[in-house]
Amino acid sequence: MGTKVKIEQSNPMCPPMMGDGNVDATVLWDWFNKAKNFFHLKSIASENKAISVAYGMSGVHTIYWLSANSLALESMMWDKYKTCMHSLFLASNWEHLTHMDVLHIQQNSKSFVKFSLEMMGKNNLLARTDSFLNDELLRDTLEVNMDRELAQECNCENLVLIISLCDWLDKVKHLDESKYQCLEEITCSHINFCPTTATCLPVPGAAASSALSSTFVPIPKLLQTKLGVLNAGSSGLVI
């Protein structure tokens, strides 16, 4: 298996360069983004965009393509050029496979910030395709694949009433952070009362009951909203 090609650019005012190696959707996305920034800084006209960066691709496959399409490239529009590069480097079903990857990204033990950035980054690879998730579909997919307890917390806080995706993402992020902060505070409070494992455990044998009563440490009372979420999680019901 070959090495993934790296995109190099001496400075934003110069066209990006791409040598030989494996090219996937992520590499192309990086290339197109750097090229787009170059167009903006240099104020390059639409009809000159493709030709201004095309020869920065020096890989074997690209060299053959450039040789065969040199005349067409002189007047080729940027969107047409990008379509050609997709066809040249990516599998015919790359859009479907990438779309399925987006739909199956799970939060699991990741923070909501890391989870959402991963999904949005993958979704951005589908920009200008029919499979691209708009704000509404992206939010639905994030809700379905987020941590179950966090989803219940969002439901309790009526986040469904928030219209803007950016506002919703910001609110969910704070809920996720506060959830872990609450668990950390409970753990720290318990450790302060019960600093070692040895003193927390009851002594086996006849003295077990007295040891248990003398070393039992009550867990701080949860807020009513937190308790409701935990109860809902144990019963398998979404509030």
Image (tube, grey):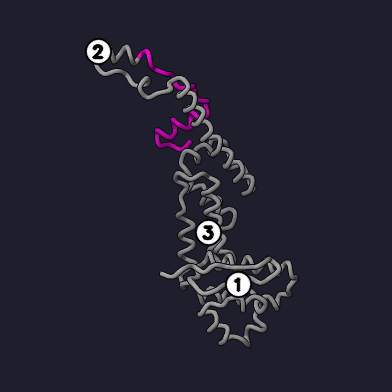
What residue appears at the point 64 percent right and 75 percent down from the top-left corner?
A: 53
Image quadrant of residue 237?
top left
Q: For numbered disc 3, what is the local secondary structure?
A: helix
What residue appears at the point 24 percent right and 16 percent down from the top-left corner?
A: 205
Q: Position of residue 107 (x, y in %)?
A: 47, 47
Which numbered tag is attached to residue 206?
Answer: 2
Mark 1 crowdedness (10 Å alpha carbons): few <14, some 14-19, many ≥20? many
Question: Of the residues under marks 3 and 1, which one precedes in the sequence?
Answer: 1
Q: Which one is closest to the eye, mark 2 or mark 3?
A: 2
Kindly identify which residue carries mark 3.
122
Give the quadrant of the N terminus: bottom left
Q: Nearer the viewer, residue 189 or 97?
A: 189
Image quadrant of residue 19?
bottom right
Q: Position of residue 214 (x, y in %)?
A: 37, 13
Q: Nearer the viewer, residue 238 or 92?
A: 92
Mark 2 crowdedness (10 Å alpha carbons): few <14, some 14-19, many ≥20? few
Image vertical order of residue 27 relative to residue 67, above or below: above
Alpha carbon separation for disc pair 2 and 3: 60 Å
Q: Which one is closest to the eye, mark 1 or mark 2?
A: 1
Under mark 1, the amino acid is Met
Q: Nearer the viewer, residue 140 or 219?
A: 219
Image quadrant of residue 55?
bottom right
Alpha carbon separation for disc pair 3 and 1: 23 Å
Q: Is residue 229 left or right of residue 32?
A: left
What segment carries the magenta color? 213-239
Q: Is residue 217 magenta?
A: yes
Q: Which one is closest to the eye, mark 3 or mark 1?
A: 1
Which numbered tag is attached to residue 17?
Answer: 1
Most extreme residue toward the left is 205
Under mark 3, the amino acid is Lys
What residue appears at the point 57 percent right and 86 percent down from the top-left corner?
A: 67
